Image (spheres, rainbow, N blue to C red):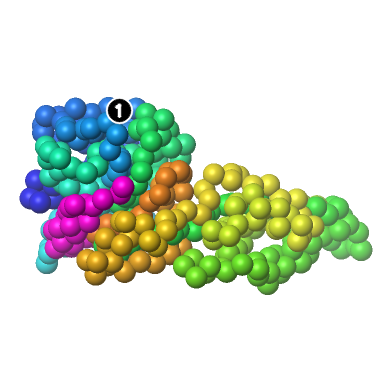
């Protein structure tokens, strides 16, 4: 894993915020070229197929992302200066998702020349995951072709996330009537919004999931008014909605719209809940290796990959987007070995 850890340190040193991943994409392409592995590229996405590709075999996609969030103000280290201390590699994106990204690459290279594999492999290093952008993995689905299984690299402590909550953001607008605050004039839009927010806070969707739990709604932003002595005629607020497998985002939107008086406008219905059957061969294979499975409350590229998928990788989701982000070198090494075991002799058909 030494050269892949070195690759990760080089990635950390490159600023690769979402939609600004060109330099990171170029580094991934240079690495593949150094291994004499042909690749394809589109926008900031890069993908490659194993050398011994055989038509008719199942196809497994190994996918992770090259973009990062911006560093928060709590950093005490330079987020772009990779440092290894006490077995930890520090730096922005080391854990989310640089560790899974380079570990999946190591596994792809390990199997690249293998003959008589019972499947074909595609490795894809993609962009815009952190912003659920349309120019990430979603933009290359047609080029990838049909996929039988996707392994999405995210920090999960090498446990299997076999289901993932969907995400929908709603912009809501409560309408009142402007008036002078000193007199009994107008209809205060803030008070109307408060009533709707209370409804959202207390509402429980009927169907709860064994893996993902209930649908979760959180009011995360609110805005109204422009002057202290004017009753506001509009109050806007934002609702973060995390759906389980029982509700498509559009269905959840329709339910919420019927609950409240405010106008409700969804930003997108794209990021629905995703999952894979517990009796799928990859889940059974992982269980035989002692891995547990769970439902993930966070959203990843699984949401836009229209094929059966699991989310699994070295690192810990609790470290993602935190100050002084890090990953243990041992996690990378153990993750590589576990990925290999998952794929060795895996039969999808």
Q: Is residue 289 magenta?
A: no
Q: Secondary structure at mark 1?
A: strand
Boundaries of the magenta span: 322-349
Q: Is residue 156 left or right of residue 142?
A: left
Q: x, y percentage for residue 225? A: 73, 54
- Residue tagged 1: 41
Residue located at (33% from left, 50% from top): 152
Residue 114, visible in the rendered structure: yes
* Residue drawn where x is 57% and y is 69% of the image: 208
10 Å crowding of disc 1: few (<14), some (14-19), many (20+): some
The structure residue drawn at horizontal position 31% and vertical position 69%, both measured from the top left corner, is 292
Front residue (pair 190, 127): 127
Q: Position of residue 235 (x, y in %)?
A: 73, 55
Question: x, y (%) of residue 16?
Answer: 31, 41
The answer to whether one can see residue 71 in this image is: no
Q: Nearer the viewer, residue 316 or 192?
A: 316
């Amino acid at each position: 894993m030494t050269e892949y850890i070195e690759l990760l340190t080089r990635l950390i040193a490159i600023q690769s915020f979402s939609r600004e991943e060109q330099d990171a994409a170029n580094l991934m392409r240079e690495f593949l070229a150094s291994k004499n592995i042909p690749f394809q590229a589109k926008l900031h996405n890069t993908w490659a197929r194993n050398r011994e590709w055989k038509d008719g075999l199942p196809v497994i996609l190994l996918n992770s992302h090259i973009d990062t969030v911006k560093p928060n103000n709590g950093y005490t280290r330079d987020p772009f200066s990779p440092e290894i201390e006490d077995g930890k590699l520090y730096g922005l994106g080391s854990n989310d998702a640089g560790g899974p990204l380079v570990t999946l690459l190591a596994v792809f290279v390990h199997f690249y020349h293998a003959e008589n594999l019972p499947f074909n492999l595609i490795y894809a290093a993609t962009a815009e995951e952190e912003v659920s952008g349309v120019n990430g993995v979603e933009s290359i689905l047609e080029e990838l072709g049909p996929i039988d299984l996707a392994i999405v690299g995210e920090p999960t402590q090498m446990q299997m996330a076999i289901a993932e909550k969907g995400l929908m953001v709603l912009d809501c607008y409560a309408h009142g009537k402007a008036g002078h605050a000193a007199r009994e004039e107008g209809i205060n839009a803030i008070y109307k919004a408060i009533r709707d927010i209370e409804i959202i806070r207390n509402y429980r969707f009927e169907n709860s999931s064994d893996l993902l739990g209930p649908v979760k709604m959180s009011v995360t932003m609110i805005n109204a008014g422009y002057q202290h002595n004017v009753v506001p005629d509009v109050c806007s607020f934002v609702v973060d909605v995390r759906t389980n497998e029982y509700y498509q985002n559009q269905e959840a939107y329709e339910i919420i719209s019927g609950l409240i008086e405010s106008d409700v406008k969804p930003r997108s219905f794209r990021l629905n809940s995703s999952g894979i059957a517990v009796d799928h061969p990859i889940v059974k294979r992982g269980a035989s290796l002692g891995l547990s499975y769970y439902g993930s409350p966070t959203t990843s590229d699984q949401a836009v990959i229209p094929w059966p998928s699991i989310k699994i990788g070295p690192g810990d989701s609790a470290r993602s987007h935190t100050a002084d982000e890090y990953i243990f070198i041992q996690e990378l090494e153990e993750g590589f070995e576990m990925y290999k075991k998952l794929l060795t002799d895996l039969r999808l058909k």
